[in-house]
């Protein structure tokens, strides 16, 4: 299923991108948060769904619906707008449009996956979008006093294709990343609306929330004798993780003495103290034995792979590694 | 300096593959630059290990070159390095020797194509700073190097370049920056300690 992710909140859009990639069934692309960039992207290859992540207290958020209206010429796409809980004006504007779902923050990835599932099931059947219209309209969060965080609403009173084109342009991507405040609803709960069925279906625990707290980035230690690989891996991961790169096992242990890490990406073949010796030392050490290790290797022959697996790492990746594979593996290990 | 990316495709480099591995755009260009700048060291190592008959060290070197060539989209070159890796792993340096000339020729050809990118200057002098500030920056730089923090170290090295060092010390600072880009923190720290004593 083709999905486009965009929006001014790069933190959330990046997080969504990672998780949809990890889910494995989505062909996910990202584009800049401008009308022109979105039109350019959807014209070439119209996705089934576009997820728009708006910035916190974005006063111009309501303009996104102009963009959605104007996008109608590219075909039947559904839009999921991720917005701040307080944006009642935004939700009211969106409630007039069909094909538009909105998700208020904080929200669970399960909520998003369920929406994408629904969109995929209804694809190619415009009438399906009006089913349950009256019920879903009631879910629209137009009243701040009655809202529940994490719920999803959907507007359905007008067919987007019938609305006139034009309207004010969406703000250009400002180049500044608006940090998500990671706010939780007033009662301290995560406010997710999750069904037991959804949890079972996605194999998730009730603790699964899309939390992109800036203070809790995971720390990855990359150990590889090749500086080109180190630089590439660091470049691929730095948007999402804190990354430290070292060129040898001894350097890694020197670093671990003073710093905590969450995962080690370890080159299998290194001169001197090689990957085998490093993981052996880690596993035999009380201090570091808990650390997950993912091997990196340029070898793909059966003998080497079996040898690697025999050392019981949390996984291995074949170099060169694509960014999506790397990130998916890390999410797989760390969650 | 302007570089036409189409020259890569014309030379048989799969830009699409390279962009797929590296993330495209500036990241691909950075990967090409790193590939170029590592070539001197790589060629020297290959020659040294062949001369010494050290098949194991040779195989590690070409093993790395195999994946790095693939990472920039030089697929044919990657296949050549893979062939040499297989032979050297089996201890067959005769076969390695037979393939050496052809492989090095292809390696040289690819390097020549990406030379304009590889030789792009990226060491930019910062705004001028006083001796007092330079000492402070140098201290912070040594701390960052001790922490293996290459990003902070690189930024501070850039800032330190704003001090009016003599040519020899400026060259050492440049060399330290190169070490930082190679994640060689101790080597970089050694050079910084050498030049910091010359800050007035």
Image: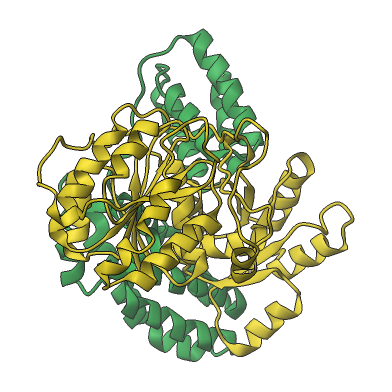
Chain colours: A yellow, B green
User: In the image, residue B73 lies at what x, y percent?
Assistant: 32, 70
A102 is higher (above) or lower (below) than B137? below
Mark yes or no: residue B72 visible: no
Quarter of the figure that contains the C terminus of chain A: bottom right
In the displayed image of the protein, which residue is found farthest to the right? Answer: A286
Q: Name the side, left or right, on which A243 lies relative to B111.
A: right
Q: Name the side, left or right, on which A142 lies relative to B16.
A: right
Mark yes or no: residue B129 visible: yes
The answer to which image quadrant residue B49 occupies is bottom right
Q: Observer-nearest residue: A39 or B166?
A: A39
Q: Name the side, left or right, on which B28 lies relative to A299.
A: left
User: In the image, residue B91 lies at what x, y percent?
Assistant: 59, 88
User: In the image, residue A115 lies at what x, y percent?
Assistant: 44, 60
Q: Observer-nearest residue: A193 or B69?
A: A193
Quarter of the figure that contains the N terminus of chain A: bottom left
In the displayed image of the protein, which residue is found farthest to the front? Answer: A134
Q: Observer-nearest residue: A125 or B103?
A: A125
The residue shown at (18%, 48%) is A69
User: In the image, residue A182 lies at what x, y percent?
Assistant: 56, 36
Q: How many marks?
A: 0
The residue shown at (19%, 69%) is B9
B184 is higher (above) or lower (below) than A133? above
The residue shown at (57%, 15%) is B136
A252 is higher (above) or lower (below) than A203? above
């Amino acid at each position: 299923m083709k999905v486009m992710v965009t929006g001014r909140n790069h933190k959330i859009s990046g997080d969504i991108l990672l998780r949809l990639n990890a889910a494995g069934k989505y062909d996910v692309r990202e584009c800049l948060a401008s009308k022109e960039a979105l039109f350019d992207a959807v014209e070439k290859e119209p996705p089934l769904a576009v997820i728009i992540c708006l910035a916190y207290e974005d006063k111009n958020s309501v303009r996104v619906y102009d963009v959605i209206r104007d996008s109608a010429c590219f075909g039947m796409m559904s839009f999921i707008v991720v917005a701040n809980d307080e944006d009642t004006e935004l939700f009211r504007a969106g409630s007039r449009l069909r094909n538009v779902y909105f998700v208020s923050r904080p929200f669970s990835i399960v909520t998003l996956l369920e929406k994408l599932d629904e969109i995929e099931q209804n694809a190619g059947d415009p009438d399906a979008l009006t089913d349950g219209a009256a019920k879903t309209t009631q879910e629209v969060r137009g009243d701040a006093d009655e809202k529940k965080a994490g719920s999803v609403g959907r507007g359905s009173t007008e067919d987007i294709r019938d609305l006139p084109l034009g309207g004010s342009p969406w703000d250009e991507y400002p180049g500044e990343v608006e940090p998500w405040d990671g706010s939780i609803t007033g009662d301290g709960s995560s406010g997710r609306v999750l069904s037991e069925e959804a949890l079972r279906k996605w194999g998730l625990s009730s603790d699964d929330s899309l939390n992109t707290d800036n203070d809790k980035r995971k720390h990855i230690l990359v150990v590889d004798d090749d500086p080109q690989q180190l630089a590439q891996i660091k470049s691929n991961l730095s948007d999402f993780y804190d990354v430290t790169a070292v060129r040898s096992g001894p350097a890694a242990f020197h670093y671990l003495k003073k710093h905590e890490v969450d995962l080690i990406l370890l080159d299998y073949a290194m001169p001197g103290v090689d990957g085998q010796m490093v993981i052996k030392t880690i596993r035999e050490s009380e201090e570091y034995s808990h650390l997950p290790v993912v091997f990196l290797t340029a070898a793909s022959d059966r003998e080497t792979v079996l040898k690697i697996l025999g050392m019981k790492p949390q996984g291995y990746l074949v170099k060169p590694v694509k960014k999506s594979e790397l990130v998916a593996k890390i999410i797989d290990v760390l969650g | 300096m302007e570089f036409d990316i189409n020259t890569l495709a014309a030379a048989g480099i799969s830009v699409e593959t390279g962009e797929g591995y590296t993330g495209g755009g500036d990241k691909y260009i950075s990967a090409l630059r790193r590939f170029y700048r590592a070539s001197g060291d790589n060629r020297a190592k290959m020659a040294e290990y062949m001369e010494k008959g050290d098949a194991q060290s040779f195989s590690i070197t070409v093993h790395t070159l195999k994946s790095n060539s693939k990472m920039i989209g030089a697929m044919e070159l990657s296949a050549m390095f893979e062939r040499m890796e297989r032979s050297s792993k089996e201890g067959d340096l005769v076969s390695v020797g037979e393939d050496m000339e052809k492989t090095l020729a292809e390696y040289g050809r690819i390097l020549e194509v990406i030379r304009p990118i590889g030789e792009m200057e990226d060491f930019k002098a910062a705004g001028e700073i006083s001796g007092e500030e330079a000492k402070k920056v140098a201290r912070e730089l040594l701390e960052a190097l001790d922490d293996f923090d290459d990003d902070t170290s690189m930024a501070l090295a850039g800032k330190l370049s704003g001090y009016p060092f003599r040519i020899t010390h400026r060259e050492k600072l440049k060399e330290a920056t190169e070490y930082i880009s190679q994640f060689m923190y101790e080597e970089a720290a050694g050079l910084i300690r050498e030049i910091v004593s010359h800050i007035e």
